[in-house]
Amino acid sequence: MPLDWNTRIKIAVGAAKGLEYMHEIANPQVIYRDFKTSNILLDQDFNPKLSDFGLAKVSPSGDNSHVFTSVIGTYGYCAPEYIQIGQLSTKSDVYSFGVVFLELITGRRAVDNSRPPRERNLVSWAKPLLNHRKKFVLLADPLLDGDYPIKGLHHALTVAAMCLQEEPSIRPLMSYVVRSLECLNIQ
C-alpha cells in the first residue's frame, strides 16, 4: 500500500529536523554528506530517524563554510558543486534533502535505469516541470490518485525546488525548510 500524502510530509518534516539539528544546533556543526532515502529509518508509526553517519564530516568553523574533499556519496543525491569540484557544505545536504523530498512527492527513485533515458535521473526529469506551476500535478505520485491538497502539492514542490537550486548560496537553511514543511503538516 502506498504512503498517503500526510505520511510523506511527516517523514519529510522529521528528516528535515534531523538535518536542521546537525547543521544549526549541533556544536560542532555536522555535514551528513550521504543523505538519501535509504538512510532514513522508519518506526511503526512512520517516525523517521537518520542513520549511517559513516560519511558525515564536521563542518569547518569561522569564515570557512565549506570544505573541499574527494567525492564520496550516492549518485543522484549529490549536489552539483560537490560532484564538480568536491566542495562540500551544509548546503550540499540541503540539495540532497531536495532530492529525497522529490522522491517522496513523486514516488520515483533518484536514479531509475528502468525508465526511458530522459526520465532516469529524477532531478533532470523534474526540473523543467518545476518551472511551470500548471505542470506541478504531473510530479505527484500517481499512486496518490489525486488524494492530496493541491495547494500543499504546490507548496511542497516550491520547497523542493528551492533545495535543488544549482547555486548553493540560494538554497535555504534547513530551519527554513522545517518551518515551511511544518505548515504543510497542518493542512
Image: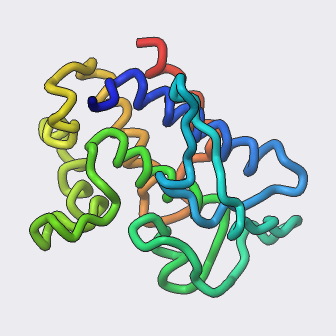
Q: Residue furthest top?
A: 187
Displayed quadrant of residue 122: bottom left
Q: Would you place residue 179 above or below residue 113 in this image?
A: above
Residue shown at 25% from the left, 48% from the top:
130
Q: Position of residue 70 (x, y in %)?
A: 63, 87
In which quadrant of the rendered image does the C terminus lie?
top left
Residue shown at 42% from the left, 25% from the top:
7
Displayed quadrant of residue 13: top right
Answer left or right for 63 relative to 114. Answer: right
Instruction: Give 143 or 65, whichever is nearer the viewer.
Output: 143
Displayed quadrant of residue 32: bottom right
Answer left or right for 49 relative to 76. Answer: right
Residue shown at 73% from the left, 50% from the top:
23
Label tally: 0
Q: Would you place residue 95 above or below residue 118 in this image?
A: above
Answer left or right for 32 relative to 147. Answer: right
Q: Would you place residue 74 above or below residue 10 in this image?
A: below
Q: Position of residue 123 (x, y in %)?
A: 31, 60
The scheme the figure's colours follow is rainbow
Residue shown at 27% from the left, 51% from the top:
108
Q: Position of residue 110 (x, y in %)?
A: 34, 60
Instruction: Give 57 or 88, whichever is nearer the viewer.
Output: 57
Q: Position of residue 183 (x, y in %)?
A: 49, 20
Q: Would you place residue 177 above or below residue 98 in this image?
A: above
In which quadrant of the rendered image does the N terminus lie?
top left
